Amino acid sequence: MNKVALITGAGQGIGLGIAMALAQEGCDIAVMDIHPDEAVISALSELRNQGAEVLYCRADVTDSEARARALDTIGAKFGCLNVLVNNAGVAPKVRADILDATEESYNWVMGINLRGPYFLTQAVANWMIAQQEADPSFESCIVNISSISATVASPSRGEYCISKAGVSMATQLWAVRLGEFNIPVYEIRPGVIKTAMTKTVQDKYDRLIDDGLTLQARWGYPEDIGKAVAALVRGDFPYSTGQVIMVDGGLTVPRL
Ligand code: NAD
């Protein structure tokens, strides 16, 4: 597969797992993240070891000028962009009851998880449409990484849940708008995945998993999400635009 993929937040965690899986599929990779260059050297070399051409765009997804600069750099290096994976995201710095949580935290989480990706998608979608019009055989897709928090209410991090519910609607909106251009838009909803984001609650989730939180009695790993994204990018779900792929070990299966 000779495609170029942009993955946001791929300096570590789930994003890096996705980038690795796509590199193994033969994609060239653009990583967008906020880490300084020195902090991503080993992640980028892991990707290069899979045979991928790799570009690091240090850019904050909430910054419209930085987003535009990153897309220009990708255009200059690769000449095209086939895949956008909106993965960068944050949890609130402090888990606070929604009776007490602050507007500052709300704005910060919503900016990174929802507003930034929404306008990055807008810019990339317009570029994909132009590429499609220039070459009808051009293949592209967009994948949004939401969370089970799109539907599972956690009142100690309301802003996170609302942002992920918003990502779900964004998936549907872009799927509707881009249908006529043959650009599928998918959503992946991870469950509890072992990364830096869940490090502070590791003991809690270890216990919950032991007690049956998930049907598959283990943590999820970045590779689990990477495999799902690779299947979408390969074209294994060609008739499923706008749909949600659950990667949660059965956590959200209703039980009695
Ligand atoms: P992580 O903290 O390990 O990685 C997030 C990455 O996003 C980091 O590299 C970070 O630098 C980057 N990032 C943060 N703010 C950014 C910004 N403004 N601009 C660009 N990049 C930015 O977390 P993760 O667990 O790998 O999470 C990745 C995605 O998966 C997030 O959207 C998260 O909400 C989602 N998710 C995670 C879990 C989980 O259990 N870990 C579950 C469901 C969904």
Image: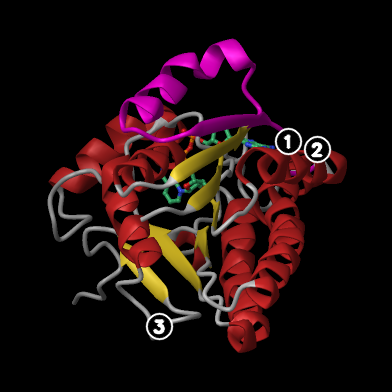
How many residues crowd around disc 3 within 10 Å: few (fewer than 14), some, or many (20 or more)?
some
Give the secondary structure at mark 1. loop
Q: CA distance from mark 1 to mark 3?
A: 30 Å
Residue pointed to by mark 1 = 60
Say which label, 2 or 3, has the lower sequence index: 2
In the orientation shown, which residue stands out farthest toward the top? Answer: 38
In the orientation shown, which residue stands out farthest toward the right? Answer: 65
Q: Position of residue 19 (x, y in %)?
A: 42, 41
Question: Which three-letter amino acid code belongs to the residue tagged 1?
Answer: Asp
Q: Are marks 1 and 3 in contact (CB under 8 Å)?
A: no
Q: Closest to the observer: 256 or 118?
A: 118
Work out whether 22 lies above or below 136: above
Residue at left offset 58%, top offset 78%: 136
Question: Which three-letter amino acid code belongs to the residue tagged 2?
Answer: Ala
Q: Which residues are magenta?
A: 34-62
**Side of 20 relative to 10 (left or right):** left
Give the secondary structure at mark 3. loop
The answer to whether residue 163 of the structure is visible from this angle is yes
Residue pointed to by mark 2 = 66
Question: To which quarter of the image does residue 32 belong?
Answer: top right
Q: Position of residue 5 (x, y in %)?
A: 51, 50
Q: CA distance from mark 2 to mark 3?
A: 32 Å
**Rendered image coloring scheme:** secondary structure
Residue pointed to by mark 3 = 240
Residue at left offset 46%, top offset 24%: 44
Residue at left offset 21%, top offset 39%: 207
How many residues crowd around disc 1 within 10 Å: few (fewer than 14), some, or many (20 or more)?
many
Q: Position of residue 94 (x, y in %)?
A: 61, 33
